[in-house]
Image (cartoon, rainbow, N blue to C red):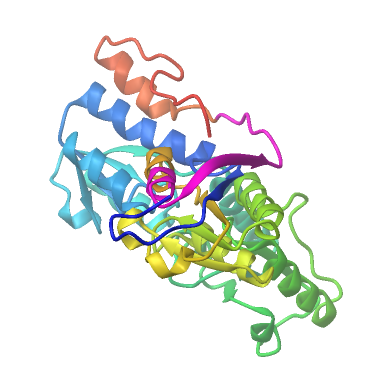
């Protein structure tokens, strides 16, 4: 194949990691905004990015969603949606005190972590929350019991912990972390606090684990891996880290405009995957970009099939009933994740 400059390119292959892209929590959050716009009419206000992806946010903005950082930007008597990452009780209380109509799009798997934090706090445990302190999800979980929760990002942080009662320590994790890194932190916690307790089921969400497993499988079969996702997407950044840990050159891109030609020059196989907040259309655009540059064959490697769906929040269905509207259980749900 020849480029416009006349330089011959090697014909290569594109290897798609599967599963990739939208998870059930992201699907649900986007559906909630779209359905709220249909039920309530625009504008509908959304606190923070509904999910961490600029393309998703921009698309919803064109439909009438208004994204704000804090509730003081929301007019009285407006409808406000809380993002998939969860919120602290103080935010919920502020919305209630102002009489705002609230729709909670928090991912059910994040809600599970909040409930665990509440339970451990009531039982007088010091809770070690493994995660990134500036991430929206961690900020929301921390708000459940700030006087009893400490945040650590890595195993090195464990040695610096000062715990009032080493006999009563529990741990929780942000849902979008690296499985391997989190395992190292938990092992460090168990060495220091032998009686530490944790959730009965892993807090890291199924989609995060599946996408990381797919990257591990694909990484050994490609020369370079492109991860499509936002810079502030924790799970997308972890996919890059997983590939690099396997010794594969990997780069995070928002879309095809971020790809540098030199990354793929001389590569016979280029891997492509996407974070859990990334729409599949960006994957398709990346594939076409690569095919135009000589990587003609496309092969998908799937490590597991996903068939997870979450119910819509009851408050949204109640709003529809109050307006005499019929609300299909999954009216706007996309067919694949």
Quadrant of the rendered image containing residue 157: bottom right
Residue occupying the point 56% across, 48% down = 13
Residue occupying the point 75% across, 49% down = 201
Name the side, left or right, on which 179 lies relative to 15: right
Residue occupying the point 36% across, 52% down = 53
Is 306 magenta? The answer is yes
Residue 45 visible within the image: no
167 or 308, nearer to the observer: 308
257 or 115, nearer to the observer: 257
Q: Position of residue 218 (x, y in %)?
A: 66, 53
Compared to residue 169, the image places residue 165 above or below, namely: below
Compared to residue 23, the image places residue 252 above or below, namely: below
Q: Position of residue 248 (x, y in %)?
A: 62, 68
Name the side, left or right, on which 135 lies relative to 175: left
Compared to residue 131, the image places residue 253 above or below, namely: above
Magenta residues span 287-309
Q: Position of residue 75 (x, y in %)?
A: 13, 46
Name the side, left or right, on which 120 lies relative to 268: right
291 or 200, nearer to the observer: 291
Is 143 magenta? The answer is no
Name the side, left or right, on which 316 lies relative to 38: right
């Amino acid at each position: 194949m020849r480029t416009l400059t006349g330089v011959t390119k090697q014909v290569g292959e594109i290897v798609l990691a599967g599963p990739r892209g939208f998870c059930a929590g992201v699907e649900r959050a986007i559906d909630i905004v779209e359905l709220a716009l249909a039920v309530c009419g625009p504008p509908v206000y959304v606190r923070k990015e509904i999910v961490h992806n600029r393309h998703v946010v921009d698309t919803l903005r064109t439909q009438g969603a208004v994204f704000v950082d804090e509730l003081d930007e929301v007019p009285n008597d407006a409808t406000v949606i809380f993002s998939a990452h969860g919120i602290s009780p103080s935010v919920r209380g502020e919305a209630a005190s102002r009489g705002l109509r609230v729709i909670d799009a928090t991912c059910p798997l994040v809600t599970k972590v909040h409930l665990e934090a509440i339970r451990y706090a009531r039982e007088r445990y010091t809770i070690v929350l493994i995660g990134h302190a500036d991430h929206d999800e961690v900020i929301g979980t921390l708000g459940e019991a700030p006087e009893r929760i400490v945040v650590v990002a890595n195993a090195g942080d464990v040695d610096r912990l000062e715990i009032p009662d080493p006999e009563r320590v529990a741990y929780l994790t942000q849902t979008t972390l690296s499985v391997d890194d989190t395992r190292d932190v938990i092992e460090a916690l168990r060495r220091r606090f032998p009686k530490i307790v944790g959730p009965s089921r892993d807090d890291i969400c199924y989609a995060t684990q599946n996408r990381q497993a797919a990257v591990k499988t694909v990484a050994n079969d490609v020369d370079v891996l492109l991860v499509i996702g936002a810079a502030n997407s924790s799970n997308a950044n972890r996919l890059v880290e997983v590939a690099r840990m396997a010794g594969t050159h990997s780069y995070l891109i928002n879309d095809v405009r971020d790809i540098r030609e030199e990354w793929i020059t001389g590569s016979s196989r280029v891997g492509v995957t996407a974070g859990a907040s990334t729409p599949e259309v960006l994957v398709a655009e990346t594939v076409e970009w690569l095919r135009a540059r000589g990587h003609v064959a496309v092969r998908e490697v799937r490590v597991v099939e996903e068939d997870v769906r979450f119910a819509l929040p009851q408050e949204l269905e109640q709003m529809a009933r109050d307006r005499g509207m019929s609300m299909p259980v999954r009216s706007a749900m996309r067919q694949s994740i």
